[in-house]
Image (cartoon, helix red, strand yellow):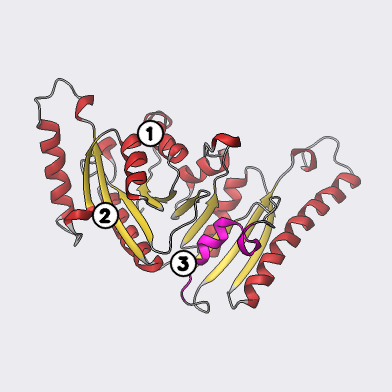
Amino acid sequence: MKKIERIMVVIDANEDYSSAPDGLPIELRKALRFVSDKKAAEIKLLSVGYEKYLGHSFQTITADYAAMRKEYCDRLTESMQGMVDKLSADGFNISSQVGWAHPRYEAIVKEAQEFGADLLVQHCRAFAKIKHIHLTHDSWQLVKHCPLPLLLVKDEEWGDSVVLMAAVDPMNSHHKPVQLDGQIIDAVTSVSGQLGGEYHVVHAYAESARPFTPAGKIKEEHTKAFNDFMSGYNVNEDKLHLIDETPVFALKDYSETLDSDMIVMGAISRSRLAEALIGSTAEEVLDFVKTDILVIKPSS
């Protein structure tokens, strides 16, 4: 994975960030952590608005509604411009853009590709007081359709030294592209170096899920596959973790054990049936893990 220098941050300009540190949303503060050279890096803020009653297809659209839509977009533009002015004064190369589209995720992917983003950043809002980070429709569609590295940001701040956790599956379950695990390791190595921190590599298997297999056989197969895969990388043994648990619980629990700030994992898009079977696990990870998730797609 090449160095991240062009970052697009999706901003919900309707949110109130006045109580946040520096008055900036957490997704933008985290994006700024990738910037070591303010002149070389470029950040673009994107806010895509949409209200059904202000859409062109709405039957009651009139000049008054058109004016309301313009006022709505102007408010988003003003909010974004305040962030741009503040960070430009600090020397950052930053710009903003306001769009109007439905579905929003399609416009976000299109703008990110046209910008040539190395990374797309989007925040996942907590649900009520239980702090369940349920992905919105837009976020989940981005996971499925965005070909770029996608960082889904939660509400926890990163530590001074960022701890990352790479989730790999060297057994290539679900016929996952072989090169995807390599891309995950390349990404976690690159990002940890850019942010300044350390990373761990985790592979989970669940021996109890195959009760009719001879005892120890599943562990033996997964241990060999994991060791063979990691032999191609220079990672200290104490940073490698083979866990006898389902992927969802392994990532959730071990992320808390390591106090990780970010999980780097892969995502693939296949048929609708495959998405229903595979995506259910991925969705549980994305919804219930409190740390940020960096989603990597296989190279085309």
Instruction: Look at the image and tell me in which quarter the N terminus lies.
Output: bottom left
| Quarter of the image where one finds residue 114 | bottom right
Q: Nearer the viewer, mark 2 or mark 1?
A: 1
Q: Which residues are magenta?
A: 20-36
* Residue at image point 23% right, 25% down: 209
Residue 120 at what x, y percent from top left?
A: 50, 57
Q: Which residue is mark 1?
A: 281
* Residue at image point 38% right, 33% down: 281
Residue 66 at what x, y percent from top left?
A: 85, 48
The answer to whether marks 2 and 1 mark residues whose Cβ atoms lie closer than 8 Å is no
Residue 119 at what x, y percent from top left?
A: 47, 60
* Residue at image point 38% right, 43% down: 268
Badge 2 or badge 1: first in the primary sequence: 2
Badge 3 or badge 2: first in the primary sequence: 3
- Label 3, secondary structure: give it: loop
The front one of 166 and 295 is 166
Q: CA distance from mark 3 to mark 2?
A: 22 Å
Instruction: Give the residue type at disc 2.
Output: Gly
Badge 1 or badge 3: first in the primary sequence: 3
Q: Residues within 10 Å of mark 1 (few under 14, many from 20)?
A: some
| Quarter of the image where one finds residue 235 | bottom left
Instruction: Give the residue type at disc 3.
Output: Phe
- Label 1, secondary structure: give it: helix
